[in-house]
Amino acid sequence: MRQLLDTVWQRRGTSWLWDEEARNQICVASEVWSLRQFLRAVSNWPDNLPSNDDQTLVVAGLDGSLDLLTPADAEAWLGDIIKPAILSFQDGYQGDAALVFWLPGCHNRIKSQMSTDEVYWLCHAPHGYQIDFGRILWGQANEYPQEILLRDGSKSAGLFHLRIT
């Protein structure tokens, strides 16, 4: 998977972020929306985004919601509800805003297959199942997600995808 040292993820595209230092670069905790707020705003996006000088929306709760569902239900929910919401956000801001899913402590829950760059979400116990994030959310366009690095040699802070189709 390609690595990204640029800050483009703070202004465009969709990211799944688990590093607190990275999150603190784009917002304060009071600016983070709940997943419920995000889903309610679909097709009725605000004129001004709450974070990063009106460039970014940070959403928390995706991880907890996935944990409450069976793997089959989680896959259906990601494909039927979350992906259309992401597409609506992209269209609403014409690709000129960043959507960031804040996933604290989930650095070990999103895994990529090194040989294929496929990305999986590891379901919470007792399921022990992997959800094919890439297939569901970005249609196997595996060459496009990039690993966010805050500086050379640092650990991964998250994943970035410029445009989901």
Image (cartoon, rainbow, N blue to C red):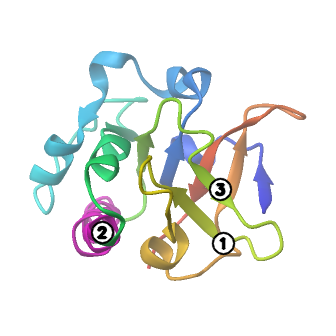
Disc assigned to residue 147 = none
Q: Is residue 101 above or below residue 105?
A: below
- Front one among 16 and 165: 16
Q: Which residue is drawn at 31% across and 58% down?
A: 93
Circle 3 sits in a helix, a strand or a loop, which is it?
strand
Residue type at mark 1?
Glu
Q: Is residue 163 above or below residue 19?
A: below
Which residue bears the numbered disc 3?
Answer: 111
Task: Judge whether residue 89 is colored magenta.
Answer: yes
Q: Residue at x 49, y 75 (%)?
A: 138
Residue on which the image places disc 1: 118
Whole-angstrom CA distance, mark 1 to mark 2, is 25 Å
Q: Of marks 1 and 2, which one's residue comes earlier in the chain?
A: 2
Query: SS for tag 1?
Result: loop
Region rendered in magenta: 73-93
Q: Residue at x 44, y 71 (%)?
A: 137
Whole-Å distance between the Cαs marked 3 and 1?
A: 8 Å
Q: Indicate the position of residue 2 as horizontal and vertical percent values.
A: 79, 60
Gap in angstroms between the C-alphas marked 2 and 3: 28 Å
- Residue carrying label 2: 91
